[in-house]
Amino acid sequence: MVDIRPFRALRHAGIPPEKMGDVTSPPYDVFTPGMQRAFYDRHPHNIVRLIQGEIHDGEVDDAGRIGRAASHIHDWLKEGILAIDEKPAIYPYRQRFTLPDGAALERRSFFAAVRLEKYGEGNIFPHEQTFPKPKGFLFGLYGGCGAHFGPIFSFYDDPNEEASKALASSMEGDALADFEEDGVRHTLWRCEDPAALEAAQAALAGREVFIADGHHRYETSLNLQEAARKAGAPEGGESDYTLMCLANASDPGMAVLPTHRLLKKIGTPAEEALAALADSYEISEEPAPVDGDGNAVARRLRELAEGGRTAFCFCAGQGPLRYLVKKETGPAADDSVEGDSAEEAVATLDVSRLRADIVDGALAASHDEADIGFTPDPGAALAAARSGECAVALLLNPTPVQAVVRIAKAGGKMPHKSTYFFPKVRTGLVSHPFAPPAMD
C-alpha cells in the first residue's frame, strides 16, 4: 500500500502569500543560465540558491555550491528566514493555467511525505530512464542540506475523488501562497484537521502511484535512505520518506503536452531524409502557418492521428511543412492489448517511432546535449526552424496518460523527454527536512 503522511514542512517565514513567487522557482532541471541569474536577482533568499547554486570561478565540481547551500540552510533557519511548521500537515495545492491552445484548466493536488518503496516491491511506479550525473548532484545536495527540496510530481487513480474531497474544506481558508507567474496561478494551503488527514491517507492506501516528474529525485531519495540506514538511522524516520506532490489522474487539469524536438546537427540533408521516409510514411506538404500559429499545427497533428495513427510535422527552415503519417496501422500505445510486453508498448509510442525512424534513422541526428533541444510550445518549435536556430523541428502529439500507466506497470521505461506534464510544480513552496542541518 502507498503510505502518505502529514509532515512538518520547511518553508519561508514572513513572506506574504502574494509574494511567494519571489522566493520560489521552477524545478531545478529546467533552469537555463539566464533563468538562474534572474532568480538570483529576484530575491536574496530565493530557493535557487539552494537547488541550483552558481558554480564560482575556479570550481571544477559541485562541492562548492553544495557547501554554500548547506550554509544557507543553517543561516536562514538561525535568522528566521526559513522555519519548520509546528504541526504536521498535508498541503493542498491548486494551479490555474491556460494551455497553448487557449483552454483554461485547473489542477488540484497536494504535498505530502510518502514512504519510499523500491521499484518492483510496492505500488510506486517509474516510467523514465535516469542518469548518474544528476543523481550524484542531488545526493550531495539533499544529503548535505538534510532536506528534499524538489517535490516529485506523481499521480494516482481515484475516480471518486476521495482524497480531494477530504482536503477540500481546507482550501476555503487563508492561503499560504497565492501568486501568478508565466500564466499559472499557484495557491497553497495547509490542512491540519485530523479527520481530513486520516481520510486522505485512507484514500491513497489502496492506490498505485505513478511518477510523472522527478525520477532522479525519487531515486536519489532511495539512495539517501540506504545511506541513512547504513549510518544507523531507525526505521520509520524522516529519511524513509520523500516529498511528493500528488494529483488525481482523473482531475480535469491533468495535462500532458508533447515535447517537440529541435535538431541542431543532422547527418543527412532534410530532403534526402524525407525521400528515405517515403516508403514507411505518407508525406504531404502544407503551407507553413503564420508566426504565432503553432496551435494550427498542433490541431492538424491531432486530426491526422485519429484512429490511433502516428503523425509528425517536419519543419526545415522557411519552406512548406511536411506532415508524416505512419503507413502501417495497428493498435496505438494507449489501446495496446493486455498481453503486450513493455518493450512492445514502448516501441509503439510516437516518441519511440520518432527517434527510431526519423531522428536516428533518416536524419542521423546528433544526440549531444548541445545539438538537440526540446520545447512543449509548437510555435516556438516552428520559430526555431524558421530562424535557423535548429536544422529541423519535429512536432508530435502528446503521450497519453494511459500509456504512461500501462508501460510503468509493465516495468518499461520510456525514451528521454517522452512526457511534459504541465504546468510544472513550483519548488520552494514546501520542503521536506529529514536530517541536519535542515532539522537542527
Image: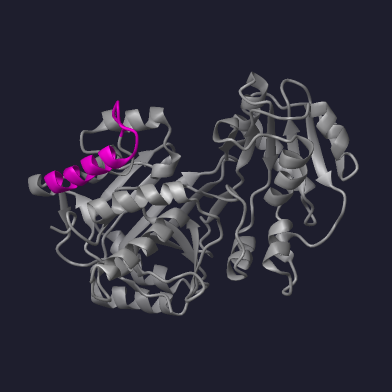
Q: Does 47 appear above or below 84?
A: above
Asked whether 70 falls inside the magenta stretch, the response is: yes
Chief SS of the magenta region: helix
386 left or right of 337 in image: left
> Residue at left 30%, top 42%?
24
Q: Which corner quadrant of the image does residue 184 belong to?
A: top left
Q: Which residues are magenta?
A: 54-76
Query: What residue appears at the point 31 percent right and 64 percent down from the top-left corner?
Result: 227
Q: Does residue 395 appear in this view?
A: yes
Q: How many marks?
A: 0
On the image, the x and y values in percent for residue 207 come to: 48, 75
Closest to the observer, 65 or 74: 65
Left or right: residue 28 compared with residue 146? right
Residue 240 x %, y %: 31, 69
Colour setup of the view: one colour
Q: Residue at x 55, y 56 (%)?
A: 128
Q: Is residue 228 magenta?
A: no
**Could you say which is closer to the camera, residue 179 or residue 110?**
110
